[in-house]
Image (tube, rainbow, N blue to C red):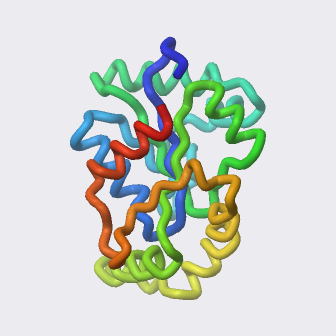
Amino acid sequence: MNSKYCSVIFIFGPSGVGKSSFGSYLSNHHNWLHLEIDIPKTNDVDIHEIKHHWDEYRKGNVTPLLTELDTRVKSLGRTGCVITFRSTDLLLNNELEFTQKQGINVAYLYGTAADCLLSFLQREESLGSQLGLNHWLTHNQQSYLRMSLPDLSSYRINVFKPDGTRRQWDEVSREIFVVNN
């Protein structure tokens, strides 16, 4: 962990796994700043005015991003920052290694495709959305398969119990912080 800056965690995973809900949990129960990148009809990092910082991070210069997040966390009296990403966003190989070396924790919230899909469909139905199976497949199939490969196993945190019900977020958070710290 880079002690110069606040704690930062990047959360990835398929649609329906609960990335946004988990970010809200950390915000509401542990006083973390939650920046959600997966906001419909927005331009991802632009919505939080961190595009320049994010672009620098993607070029290998993490200092502007960590400095900005640290400034926001401290000015708001928060304890850390969690960024939740779209289902199509992934960190792989060198990017993942680089991010971890910079002291940024990374977790892939995970579950069976059936559990994630059912959760997604239930959420969309409760919102009165027209998004269904084809949307999930179009936006998750490739990234879900990629995050299911063995090289990401140490970053995956299963958020569903064997019966398909969701684990409690406090249990998931303890697992993330033990695994990643």
Location of residue 141 (image quadrant) = bottom right
Residue 7 image offset from top left, x and y in percent = 44, 27
- Furthest residue in direction top, as rendered: 4
Examine the rendered structure and indicate whether residue 114 appears above or below residue 181. Answer: below
Examine the rendered structure and indicate whether residue 140 appears above or below residue 137. Answer: above
- Furthest residue in direction left, as rendered: 29
Nearer to us in this view, 74 or 141: 141
Nearer to us in this view, 87 or 36: 87
Question: Going 57% across and 63% down the picture, which residue do you hit?
Answer: 87
Question: Going 68% across and 59% down the picture, which residue do you hit?
Answer: 150
Question: Going 35% across and 19% down the picture, which residue do you hit?
Answer: 74
Examine the rendered structure and indicate whether residue 87 appears above or below residue 175. Answer: below
Q: How many numbered circles does the render carry?
A: 0
Left or right: where does residue 163 sit relative to residue 107? left
Nearer to us in this view, 130 or 30: 30
Left or right: where does residue 85 sit relative to residue 98? left
Residue 155 image offset from top left, x and y in percent = 56, 49
Question: Going 61% across and 72% down the picture, which residue do you hit?
Answer: 140
Residue 40 image offset from top left, x and y in percent = 49, 63
Residue 117 image offset from top left, x and y in percent = 47, 79
